[in-house]
Image (cartoon, rainbow, N blue to C red):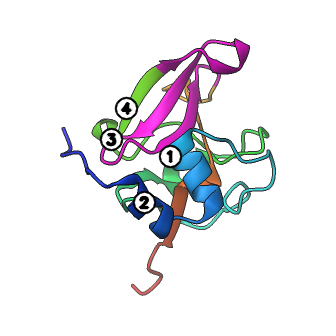
Amino acid sequence: MTDKLAIPDAQWREKLTPEQYHVLREGGTERAFTGKYDKNKQAGEYLCAACGQLLFDSTHKYDSGSGWPSFTAPADEDVVEQHRDVSMGMVRTEVLCSKCDGHLGHVFPDGPGETGLRYCINSAALDFEPEDDAS
C-alpha cells in the first residue's frame, strides 16, 4: 500500500490548473472527446497529474470510442483504488490514485482482452511521459 499524501486544499489549488483541480479534487469529469490524451497513440507512461505516481502505460491503452483515454489495466494493481459511486443517478466504480486520492475516472466491465475492463480516465487527471526513443 502506498503512503498517502497529506496536502492541504490550498496547496492543491496552487499546484493544479482549475480543470485539474475540478477533476482530481472535486470528482469532476471533462467533456468527452476534449481531453488531450484521448487520441494519444505514443508509447509511454501516464502519471497522476497531482502527485506524479505512475498509473497506466501505453501498452494497456486502447480506443474505446468513449471520448476519454481508456485502459484495460493499471500499471500495477496497487496504484489505483476503487470505490462505489452512486452519483449521477447510476451505480459505477470510481477509480482514485492510491497515493493522493485524486479522482481519475471510472472502471467498467465492458473492456476488451483478458481483463474485460475499461478504465475510463480523464485526461486532466493525467500527465504523459513519452517512451525514450534513444536505444
Structural distance between the alpha carbons of marks 4 and 2: 24 Å
Q: Are marks 4 and 1 in contact (CB under 8 Å)?
A: no
| Mark 4 crowd level (few <14, some 14–19, many ≥20, 10 Å Cα) | some
Which quarter shows the C terminus? bottom left
Task: Give the numbered dot on residue 10.
Answer: 2
How much space separates mark 3 and mark 4, taking CA atoms? 5 Å
- CB atoms at circles 3 and 4 under 8 Å apart? yes
- Report the amino acid beneath label 2: Ala
**Residue 81's disc number:** 4
Label 1 amino acid?
A: Arg
Q: How many marks?
A: 4
> Which quadrant holds residue 50?
bottom left
At label 2, counting other C-alpha atoms closer than 10 Å, the crowd grade (few under 14, some 14-19, many 20 or more) is few
Seen at 34% across and 48% down, the residue is: 100
Q: Is residue 89 magenta?
A: yes
Q: Residue at x 34, y 54 (%)?
A: 8
Residue at horizontal 77 percent and vertical 38 percent from the top: 66
Tell me the element at label 2. Answer: helix
User: At x 59% / y 14%, what residue is drawn?
Assistant: 86
In the rendered view, would you say 43 is above or below 5?
A: below
Residue 98 marker: 3
- Mark 3 crowd level (few <14, some 14–19, many ≥20, 10 Å Cα): many
Front tag of 3 and 1: 1
**On residue 25, which mark appears?**
1
Q: CA distance from mark 4 to mark 1?
A: 15 Å
Q: In this picture, is 29 found above or below 57? A: above
Tell me the SS state at disc 1.
helix
